[in-house]
Image (spheres, rainbow, N blue to C red):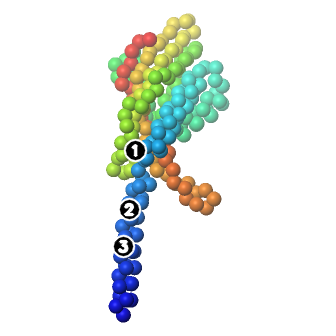
Amino acid sequence: MQKTKNWANVLALTALLALAAIPQLAQAQNEISPERKQAIDSLALEKVRDLSKYISAIGDKKTPSAEADRIINRALELFEPSAQMGVSSLNRPTVRNYPVKDYLRRLRQLRYNSVKIEWYNIQYVSELVRQPNGIYVGVVTIYQRFEGTMDDGMKYVDTTKKDITIYVKRKEQQIAGRLIGFWDVLLGDIRVSETKRG
């Protein structure tokens, strides 16, 4: 009888230890290893570079309308749904913020004969920081050179420093009947921090 009781205690203790390990396992899955962080950083910078190409193509007056619409949809896939884009001008003192979809459509409708947009010096300026909800947040800084030319040859040129919020989230996807966990990167708000001539 004593052996049975001892065996029951061992089983109960094992079950308790297993239950206690579940939150630790879940937490471990939500931690980013240094190797994984390096891959995530690369993915984030790749998505920012993709956005750079999309914006350049959307703004280019030579891009056919149907192609521009397709590129706008591709660009939107990079963002959190509520993300906003800051827009500045040397001709006004305030920065205007638009939902990303509105910004991309407005970019397409600019009243210039030609538009050239170039992003350069793309770099991380902050470490990824884990938030209480388990999402990691970081910031990538870019410089954007905008050049718009009117029919009469007049040009508007500025360079803007922008900070892009990066969100890294743990997601799951069902593949062949199994749930596979992975980290995904989405872009958030893009804020203007400085605008100057040239």
Frontmost of labels 2 and 3 is 3
Nearer to me, 167 or 60: 167
Tell me which label, 1 or 3, sits earlier in the chain: 3
Mark 1 Cα within 10 Å, few/some/many (few <14, many 20+)? many
Residue type at tag 2: Pro
| Mark identifier at residue 136 | 1
Which residue type does callout 3 highlight? Leu
Q: Position of residue 131 (x, y in %)?
A: 35, 47
User: Mark 2 = which residue?
Assistant: 23
Q: Name the residue beneath numbered marker 3.
A: 16
Q: Quadrant of the C terminus?
A: top left
Image quarter of the N terminus: bottom left
For this orientation, the residue located farthest to the front is: 3
Q: Amino acid at mark 1?
A: Tyr
Q: Are marks 1 and 2 in contact (CB under 8 Å)?
A: no
* Residue beneath the point at 36% across and 73% down: 16
Helix, strand or loop at mark 3: helix
Q: In this rendered view, identify the residue nearer to me: 125 or 91.
A: 125
Residue 72 pos. (x, y %): 57, 33
Q: CA distance from mark 1 to mark 2?
A: 19 Å
Label 1 sits on a secondary structure element that is strand
